[in-house]
Amino acid sequence: MEEIINERVPEQSRPIIEFRGVSKTYPTGTHALEDVNIRINNGEFVFVVGSSGAGKSIFMKLIMREEKANTGIITVNGFNLTSMKRKQIPLLRRTMGIVFQDFRLIPTMNVFQNVAFAMHVVGASDRNVRKEVSKALSKVGLGNKARSMPAQLSGGEQQRVGLARALVNSPDLIIADEPTGNVDPNMSYEIVSLLTEINKRGTTVLMVTHDHNLVRDFQHRVIMLDRGKIVADNAGGSF
Ligand SMILES: Nc1ncnc2c1ncn2[C@@H]1O[C@H](COP(=O)(O)OP(=O)(O)O)[C@@H](O)[C@H]1O
Ligand SMILES: [Mg+2]
């Protein structure tokens, strides 16, 4: 087992996520994860794959501290998730942008307001909100849709709003559990291209997908889960 890396290690090889001997068992007896050991460095793009029920969503939920492990140690962005207090969870979440499969936009708010909301909740000033929301919307190619309502947008456009909302607070880490599960194939490529660009500027990206074509065409690291265990970890985009 490797030691936790200290600050002198170059930025790119500093672990941002580390699991050591992590298991998650539900009272129903389901072993959702079993003895998972993994390290993801700052700046990586990682696809998480595996069949339904393999433990992919649980893996992501543990990283967001939406669920707690039964055993093992999880470190995310300098936070020890095992020992952290409940009131520290918002501090952890502020370092991550979360993209949902079902978009989770607020239907009564327009595109601008949906993205701005994510900044208001962390106490940003109105001026900063206007500036950063515009930047985030242009990044995802929706600069001209700021006044549209979610229902007026296609699935792919709605997910790009979701992406802008995840980006707007400049997170260190983006967590996306099947973000392309509800969009058509062309738009899936566009969303992963956007995530890849964001990653090239330094943000770590962790994305669950079922889409073999995406995994093949975007050559990123691939972690494969099967029945709660990591069964493959390839740097070259194959599985
Ligand atoms: N709250 C829960 N209570 C009991 N079992 C659960 C719960 N959440 C998930 N599981 C089980 O844990 C396993 C992994 O689930 P999940 O991580 O959601 O799989 P997937 O790889 O499809 O995302 C599955 O067998 C699932 O039924
Ligand atoms: Mg899942």
Image (cartoon, rainbow, N blue to C red):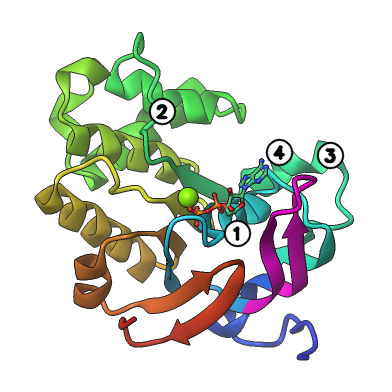
Q: Which residue is mark 2?
A: 104
Decide which of tag 4 and tag 2 comes sooner along the chain: 4
Q: Quadrant of residue 183?
A: top left
Left or right: 34 in relation to 140: right
Element type where label 4 sits in the image: helix
Question: Visible in this render: residue 14?
Answer: yes
Q: Amino acid at mark 2?
A: Arg
Q: Which mark is residue 59?
A: 1
- For the residues labelled 2 and 3, the Cα–Cα distance comes to 24 Å
Is disc 1's CB within 8 Å of ligand 1? yes
- Quarter holding the N terminus is bottom right
Question: Visible in this render: residue 78?
Answer: no
Residue drawn at point x = 43 percent, y = 71 percent:
46
Q: Nearer the viewer, residue 204 or 133?
A: 204
In percent of width and height, residue 4 lies at 78, 82
Contact, CB < 8 Å: mark 1 with mark 2?
A: no
In percent of width and height, residue 163 lies at 35, 43
- For the residues labelled 4 and 2, the Cα–Cα distance comes to 19 Å
Q: Residue furthest front?
A: 29
Crowdedness near tag 1: few (<14), some (14–19) or many (≥20) residues, C-alpha within 10 Å? many
Task: Identify the main secondary structure in magenta.
Answer: strand
Q: Is residue 33 magenta?
A: yes
Q: Which residue is mark 3?
A: 86
Decide which of tag 1 and tag 4 comes sooner along the chain: 1
Q: Residue furthest bottom?
A: 1
- Judged by depth in the image, the label closer to the viewer, 1 or 3, is 1
Q: Report the span colored magenta.
A: 19-38
